[in-house]
Image (tube, helix red, strand yellow):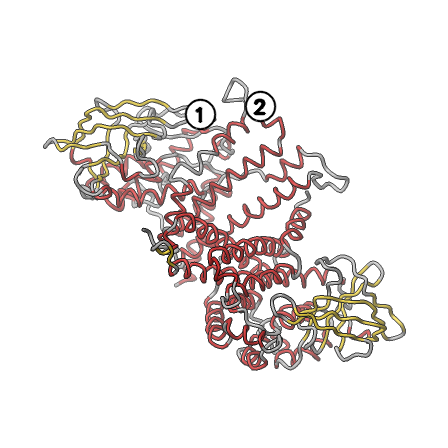
Amino acid sequence: MALILTEEQKMLKDSAKELLATKSPVSKMRDLRNSKYTPYDPKLWDEMVSMGWSALTIPESYNGLDFGFVGLGQVLEQTGRNLSKSPLVSSILLGTSALRLSDNEILKAKLFPGIMEGTCKLAFAMQEGIYHQTKLFKTSAVLEDENYTINGSKTIVIDGTTADHYIVVCQINDNLSLFIIDSNSKGITISKKILMDSGSYADVTFKNVSVSAENQLNIKLDGSQLLDQIMTIAYAGISAELLGICKQSFDITIKYLKERQQFGVIIGTYQALQHRAVILFSEIELCKSIVLKALQAIDNNDPEALKYSHLAKAKLCKTTKLVTNEAIQLHGGIGVTDDADIGFYLKRARVAKQLFGDYNYHLDQLAVIKGY
Amino acid sequence: MEIKTDVSLSNFRTETRAWLELNCPESMRQPIKDPSDLYWGGRNAKFKSEDQRLWFERMFEKKWVVPYWETKYGGGGLSSEENNILTQEMIRLGCRKPLYSFGISMLGPALLNFASEEQKLKYLPQIAEGKIWWCQGYSEPNAGSDLASLQTKAIDKGEYYEITGSKVWTSYADKSDWIFCLVRTDFNASKHNGISFILIDMASKGVSTRPIKLISGKSPFCETFFDAVKVPKENLIGEINEGWTIAKYLLTHERQMIGGIGETDIKKEVHSVALEKLPLNNNGSISDGVLRNQISDFEMDEEIFDLTIQRVTDEAKTGNNSGALSSFFKFYGTELNIARYELLMDISGTEALFWGENEKTEGDLARKFCRSKGNSIEGGTSEIQLNIISKLILGLPTK
């Protein structure tokens, strides 16, 4: 399969580019921050829904567009470029993918319509400590009669304060299980956390929360395998956003190098700066390839999809760190002022890098997959 | 219409595969161990084995030595789709190229773009027949990165040019029959505007060569000297004083070759070498955590670089291509190869240091490591590639 976008995917990319650059540029994100860290603008979310983005990865059998993850990746790349805030990552990339991969058809029939309309918003509650991992969780689910009782604490739940339902990763003996839990259920405590990207996250505590066995995502499926599949999508999707962050930070920086004058010349004429810029260009060229490959691998059910997702997240975390750091340095003093947009890219990059594992985690997993 | 084309291409693939399986001798499907395993042709051509002769002659009769050139120039006249299929099938079976030749990879494209019809008909078929071994005369002792400041001069003597000067890094000059050269034909013009592209018979009076020994040992590189060599005027390619255009065009081809595009040999994975050499933990993982990370990081970049070659190749097929990207591939590909040998040296401990007295059979890794240091210099240094990308792709201003 050719490693390029199809015409339809290109059209989606172009429409996302246009909408977000006009309706949700970085200045909007600054406004949200300045308005007491408002999580996102509901009007923008409505626009996204009317563009069909909430239906992109929902199967046709549930009246979705089934457009594929390469498509969703194009939208996420543009949100990275514009630092647009919306429930796209929490509810569509994570929540909807978990539901899509589930074998609980009743839950799908119940929730997909609301998700597509944008009225039902999901959040993914997995992480417990200060690092990403996928093997062992303290949050437990215990079956009593027809219901499970959930106990435990989750952290870094993206959009955890505004979601209607949580998808919660729980430990049941030696295996994992995922449940959909109404965020208004009795026994849930939500504590809002603002991170350095001005985004809204939550610590969510479950104390003897009762949930029907019908809300289990994995009926016959193995919970750990289901989580691996969801993570394959999460890694690739966040990588797509990171790619947008890299590209935009780079473009802003190159523009600055062409304008800024010191010693009577444009600073972009200095070879020391030119070579640093080309190193960034080269690493971004590699990033473009692996993000597309990882997204295509998901759409094609490639048996190596998880490996490509690890490759994508590892490479994008490493490159985003390099690009955003260099972007600040190449801007000089203006780069560390709040007035300049470039600092927002540094701050979002640091959060997106840590979400679902940083460079070191994914590099280690790659070595494990290859048996060394 | 499209379906019909697909069917005919699919037939072409089936026939090609069958023909290659029948005609490519087993020994010509083995990986190349030594550069001397390759067949270069030329006036004094000698086949290293009966299989090598058979393979070349069969491919020659099939007109597949240069399958994509027009038949009037000695090529096979294949379409680019057919040529891709042939290349894919040859890679699949591990077939060696029947002829290694700078004539095919470098001079040929220049002639096709810049030579007169008469010159094309004279030189291209000789290349496709493997009759002439060509070498390239670009760099000079005082014109390396600053290639355009070259000083080898061609003086107009009416009937002929008289050429005096010296070239360096001329690969296989001591074995070649002809050389394609950049010479200065106008000393008053600015440095880029006084250069011409000319073909010189190495058997001419006044041409001599001297091999260059590298830090890795013997090498194909030579110095080449021209002492008042008479060269017929009809050997000039393109317009006089416009050789720099041809030079730039050819450098793009050279960069693609060095950068790894079109490279077909399969390299052993670094981590498999590591698993053989390094101590392991009980779970089979490499116990040296620092090296393990470095290997994983290297293999990440290596795999994604290959994907990038694929992506850019696929983009080029849709007409989306920037020639300056060859500088990116040259830069990144050679730096990766250097990193590869640094890692292999680290992984192999003191075993890597063995040099020995016989360079053909001993000290393979240490010598390859030393040789890799030239990768980011030959064909334009990494720094020159960064300059090109800065100017042509990023559009950063020059002073």
Q: Which residue is mark 2?
A: B354
Q: Is residue B53 left or right of residue B157?
A: right
Chain ID of residue with mark 1: B
Residue A294 coordinates in the image, percent (x, y): 58, 58
Residue B265 seen in the current view:
yes
Q: Which residue is mark 1?
A: B49
Residue B202 coordinates in the image, percent (x, y): 26, 26
Residue A242 coordinates in the image, percent (x, y): 56, 61
Which residue is at the far top? B357
Chain ID of residue with mark 2: B
Three-letter code, disc 2: Phe
Residue at x 55%, y 58% (from the top left corner) = A291
Q: Dot 1: within a 10 Å radius of its alpha carbon, few (fewer than 14), some, or many (20 or more) residues? A: few
Q: Dot 2: within a 10 Å radius of its alpha carbon, few (fewer than 14), some, or many (20 or more) residues? A: few
Task: Identify whether B304 is placed above or below A39.
Answer: above
Residue A243 coordinates in the image, percent (x, y): 53, 60
Three-letter code, disc 1: Ser
Residue at x 46%, y 50% (from the top left corner) = A276
Task: Identify whether B98 is placed above or below A295.
Answer: above
Q: Nearer the viewer, residue B386 or B209?
A: B386
Q: Secondary structure at mark 2?
A: loop
Q: Is residue B192 left or right of residue A132?
A: left
Which residue is at the far front? A263
Q: Is residue A67 left or right of residue B11?
A: right
Cα distance, mark 1 to mark 2? 31 Å
